[in-house]
Image: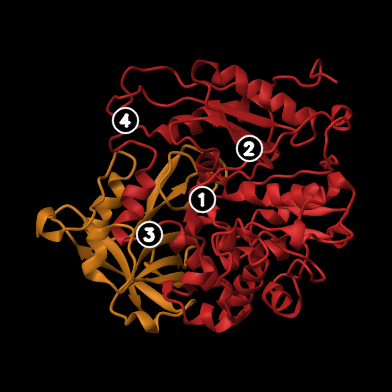
Chain colours: A red, B orange
Amino acid sequence: MTLRGAVALIGIGEVKPERRMDGRTALGLAAQAARECIADSGLRKDEVDGLITEIPTGNPTVLADYLGIRPVYSTGVQMMGASGATSIATAAAAIHAGLASNVLCVVGGPAPGGEHGGGPGAPDYRRQQFDAPYGPVVAANGGYALIAQRYKYEFGTTDEQRAAVAVQQRFNALANPAAVFYGQPITKDDVLNSRVVADPLRLLECVMPVGGAAAVIVSAADRARYSPHPPVYLLGAGMCVDHDAIPYAPTMTTSPVAVSARRAFAMAELGPRDMDMLSIYDCYTITVIICLEDAGFAPKGEGGAFIESTDVTYRGTLPLNTHGGQLSFGQPGLAGGMSHVVESVRQMMGRGGERQVRDLDYCFVNG
Amino acid sequence: MTTQSYGLPVPEPNALTQPFWDAARRHELVVQRCRPGSHLFFYPREYCPVCLSGELEWVAVSGRGRLYSHTVVNQPGDPRFQSRIPYVYAVVQLDEGPRMVSNLVDCAPEDARVDMCVAVTFDDVTPQISLPKFRPA
């Protein structure tokens, strides 16, 4: 299977190069090229469902947010002079694989080191002028506190329900000697009595940042049968990006997982009810509740009640974050989300040890 | 009041955002609107996030809105805010639609409630910069 003949390039956009670009922001330049390109292609903006960038912000979410698009496939490329060609090949692979249909590739920015390299025109003007003066909370705590606060208001979810996430995941970690909180059980009261970090989130509802790393090898299916462990086949995948800054998210209480999970299930020809085990991203307790709902495991607004009334430990009816999740295993650097993948593969291979989930055929992972 | 005595981060306007800060200095709250579609939006951009039009203008808004969400800050990311804790970091949804990050002032932090009515008030932090903040209305 190759990409030969699989895709075509259908539009271009280009900002006229200038040595000085007074008054322009890096994001504005990228947006200008993107806008011209979309117009040139004849597509409507909402038909663009993929985004690949190499821009000074280093992150495609920033451009997706700015343009008001919601790609179901996006990634950054960091290949210096080869970024343009790399983005085309990456887009082709994504399209060929069914991850997107119309992928916008954007590479560019102001002259490096010049007036707009890091000064007032730099892409983080939004942060410098419209966020920093108001004293945001340390790290990501503030954004997720806003989500939790809004979620409480819309759905009446209680602090006790969020605490149930932390307590059940900690139980799982007690069966994982690699977890940072191994050997340290907690109760709901421990969570509720822990220090408020960013109202309404408490200390035991937030990840513990730690050092670490994680990796997985993916091989062609026809080679996988020679591997020493039972191969774990990828049956479906989906992505979605719809904002960069939480204050400007279309809604704070529904995440892009609503789209990405639906796409993954469709590709797999399976649904939430078919899953035997879940590995749900858990930077904070509220994240688990919202992702569970958005992936279809509980109705919107009922994720908290679901967690409170369901045994989601490794020996329960719907095992969730059996390694303890980042909340109890730890969030190693940027590899935090990879720990969910590694644990899922470990369990699917039957190497879960004391916390092995029984009768495991299908597993859901999100990041 | 000088920047030095204020002691907290002060916005550094660029060509894109200068009209916003000029208006704020006059104690007027403005957001951008695209001419073809009349879409209102904030934070400032060079293209409309709805239709990608580059024909944009600044328009005054009422300054009234509701508290969309908030958190009481006790652990600021920037240590310069340590002397101000506890304070309310807020996301306000203007009656006209756009959201903005700000602070809730003239209100005890424990009295902040999602969806409460708020109105803009300006904090003249330097001779050039007035920060839009919001108080209960």
Are the residues under marks 3 and 4 on the same chain? yes
Locate residue A77, reporting x and y percent.
56, 28
Question: Which is closer to the viewer, label 3 or label 1?
Answer: 3
Name the chain under label 3. A
Q: CA distance from mark 1 to mark 2?
A: 29 Å
Residue occupying image coordinates x 69% and y 42%: A72
Mark 3 or mark 4, earlier in chain: 4
Q: Do circles 1 and 2 both sit on a common chain?
A: no
Name the N-terminal-most of marks 4 and 2. 2
In the rendered structure, find residue A361 and report the number of the disc placed on it: none
Residue A11 rendering spot, x and y as whole percentages: 65, 22
Dot 4: element: loop
Looking at the image, tell me whether mark 3 or mark 2 is earlier in sequence order: 2
- Asked whether the residues under marks 4 and 2 belong to the same chain, the reply is yes
Q: Mark 4: which amino acid?
A: His
Residue depicted at 73% across the width and 31% down the height: A94
Q: Quadrant of the N terminus of chain A?
A: top right
Q: Residue type at mark 1: give it.
A: Ser
Q: Which residue is mark 4?
A: A116
Res. A364 image quadrant: bottom right
**Circle 1 Cα neighbour tier, 10 Å, few/some/many (<14 / 14–19 / ≥20):** some
Name the residue tied to disc 1: B38
